[in-house]
Amino acid sequence: LVPLTAGGLSLLRGPNWIGHPPVVPTDLDSHFRYVSGIFFGVGVAFVGCIPDIARKGPRFRLLGALVVTGGLGRLLSLVMVGPPGAGHLFGLAMELGVVPLLMLWQRRVERGFAQRAASSPGPASARGR
């Protein structure tokens, strides 16, 4: 829900909604909304994994890797420029803490599904699922 909410609000309202002055440079606003669109799209793609999470491992891991990479960029900013506001620190915790844990959880679900499918008789095991 975080990428959908934050990405959607950022797309629609620009950087103003996170406390920046009403007028920011045009190029900064453009880039902010571009990155927000990518963030929103990642959220939509994560939601698309939910109905069949046990079989969406490659997609889920790719999306997770994108989020972790963004978190590493945010961590680099923290080291080089200084700590951001609370909302961005929350994002950092999500990107480098929660998302990797979700990736591990999804992998566990995927393995459990594969083991159950391999050990159960019937069409699923005959197809190698």
Image (spheres, rainbow, N blue to C red):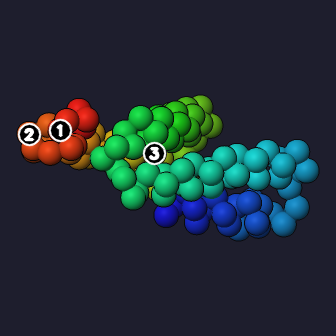
Q: Amino acid at mark 1?
A: Ser
Residue at image coords 41%, 35%:
58
**Residue at the location (37% across, 39% down)?**
57
Q: Looking at the rendered structure, which numbered label has been put on residue 125?
A: 1
Residue 75 shows up from this direction: no
- Specify few, some or many for label 2: CA neighbours under 10 Å numbering under 14, 14-19, or 20 or more: few
Query: CB atoms at circles 2 and 1 under 8 Å apart?
Result: yes
Q: Give the image quarter of residue 23.
A: bottom right
Distance from label 3 to label 2 (Cα)? 36 Å
Residue marked by disc 3: 95
Q: Tag 1, which secondary structure?
A: helix
Q: Secondary structure at mark 2?
A: helix
Please give the name of the residue rendered at 66% of the width and 47% of the height, measured from the top-left corner.
38
- Of tags 2 and 1, the one toward the viewer is 1
Check disc 2 and report the residue beneath it: 119
- In the image, residue 20 sits, relative to residue 120, either above or below, namely below
Residue ranking furthest to the right? 26
In this rendering, position of residue 30 left or right of residue 120: right
- Residue 59, given in percent of the width and then of the height, sits at 46, 39
Q: Is residue 107 left or right of residue 27?
A: left
Q: Looking at the rendering, which quadrant does residue 51 occupy?
A: bottom left
Would residue 12 appear left or right of 112 to someone viewing this image? right
Q: In the image, what residue type sits under mark 2?
A: Ser
